[in-house]
Image (tube, rainbow, N blue to C red):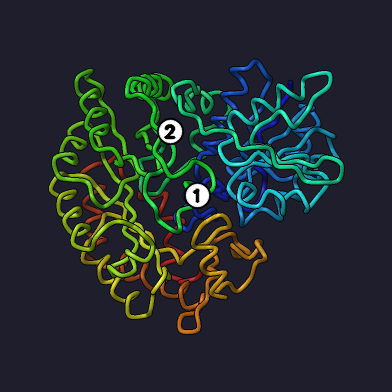
Amino acid sequence: MRILMLNPPFKPRFSRTSRSPAVSKGGCVYYPIWLSYATGVLEQEGHKVKLVDAPAENKTLSDVLTLAKRFKPDLAVLDTSTASIISDIKVAEALKEATECFITLVGTHVSALPEWTLQQSPAIDAVARHEYDYIIRDLAAELEKTRPSLKRVKGLSYRRNNKIVHNENMPLIEDLDALPFVSKVYKKHLNIWNYFYPANLYPEITIVSGRGCPFRCTFCLLPQTMYGRGYRTRSIGNVIEEVKYIKKAFPEAKEIFFEDDTFTANRHRVREFCNRLLAEGIELTWSANARADVDYETLAKMKQAGCRLLCVGIESAEQKILNNIRKGTTVQGIRQFMKDAKRAGILVHGCFILGNRGETIETIKKTIEFAKELDPDTAQFFPIMVYPGTEDYEYYKEKGFLVTENYSQWVTEQGAHNCIVSRPWLSNKELVEWCDKARREFYMRPKFIAKTLAKGLKNPAEIPRIAKAARTFFKYLIKGTR
């Protein structure tokens, strides 16, 4: 079967795979990692697959339709997000008219709202809910039959006799080692120079060593809509083999980023991974997502094994707010983690959310000062972004704090984040302004500027990353616009 795996055109450089999909102020462009995994599964089954990342490649709808007409897919799988869903549906309609192929939508938004999605257009033949690697595999196998029956495909929602049918869920994949290396899919289908994470060395390769997250943060999108609140992991041996492949296949890559929701959720496993790298003499620069609760001994082992940076959700300086969002961390623990990370020599990219449950202007000011006190190597400040399928979306909707449910308003005309949570005492516009103020106060400090320049002088490998991020980010700091 001929299958088109499409990250649809929307805003240029739009990161649909991000936990808060938007056009990044720092120029961040995520790999289409989940589409890539599913592409690998389909290729294992012998299908002829074409993976197209339109936003990263600056492809327009016209470009995609021309490509699709030439490729003549039997099945097209389109990734989605809340911010882009209205556009994604229009792309599906145009693709249906151009090719008459079977069209399936995947991703966070349609997993949360499969019925709503199917009601929007007859061009959408089905929705694959949640983790979709094996759903698409089974759908392709079914469509190849002389008499296909969609009711046999777990995890699928579709129309039958003018009614919308939701098949039972597809179980989450337990044997993640059975999946192909996503980096092999990148090698075949993508250009790694199109992808950039401002905190990481450039270019980098993003993979995952596990799916899901055991923690209960009320705002976090992927665990609640796609991969579950449990941490399923690949074997260390399997991860090490992919690391070896990447080092051989991508000699230009400066870093590997582990995009697990919380790579450090199992510290014993982290130390085992580090020990394997050291025992096999694998020289590797890598980074990962983490919580602000990793102990010094683990951090020191990570540094010894080549860990350069951790991306850490700090969120707030107010303990009550951390409790409200079920973060499971403490202000005291965050301070200790930052001290330990600096002592171990690991860089930290700190993530802060303004506008969480219980937020006031006073707590926002406290968080900005906290960010400057902690002094992570880089930082991001986002207004609270809520998405269908998350506890926060339901909470703010019930409170009457959503200014719109027009999903196209989740980003600005330029594609930047657009907060839609507004309280009587703290409006959505004020939250955006406070994020702009926080960025200026954090990044325009003489201490930060001097530290960044020193970092570039000490390690020339940092210079391309710093320069590339600064070119995009600097205009936002000066203008203070979104």
Up/down of 87 relative to 319, above or below: above
Residue at label 1?
Answer: 224
Kindly state the secondary structure of the residue where label 1 is placed. helix
Q: Residue furthest bottom?
A: 425
In the rendered structure, the answer to whether residue 175 lies left or right of residue 256 reads: right
Looking at the picture, tell me which residue is in the foreground, 271 or 170: 170
Choose the circle earlier in sequence order: 1 or 2.
Answer: 2
Residue at label 2?
Answer: 207
Looking at the picture, tell me which residue is in the foreground, 111 or 367: 111
- Residue located at (42% from left, 25% from top): 250
Amino acid type, mark 2: Ile
Indicate the position of residue 167 as horizontal and vertical percent values. Answer: 68, 38
Indicate the position of residue 450 as horizontal and vertical percent values. Answer: 22, 59
Q: In the image, which is nearer the foreground, mark 1 or mark 2? A: 1
Amino acid type, mark 1: Gln
Quadrant in which the N terminus appears = top right
Bin the neighbour count of mark 2 within 10 Å (Cα to Cα): few under 14, some 14-19, many 20 and up.
many
Indicate the position of residue 443 as horizontal and vertical percent values. Answer: 32, 64
Up/down of 194 relative to 1, above or below: below
In the rendered structure, the answer to whether residue 334 lies left or right of residue 234 reads: left
Kindly state the secondary structure of the residue where label 2 is placed. strand
In the rendered structure, the answer to whether residue 124 lies left or right of residue 420 reads: right
- Residue located at (43% from left, 63% from top): 382
In the rendered structure, the answer to whether residue 244 lies left or right of residue 191 reads: left
Up/down of 359 relative to 30, above or below: below
Indicate the position of residue 313 as horizontal and vertical percent values. Answer: 34, 55
Q: Quadrant of residue 266?
A: top left
- Residue located at (49% from left, 62% from top): 392
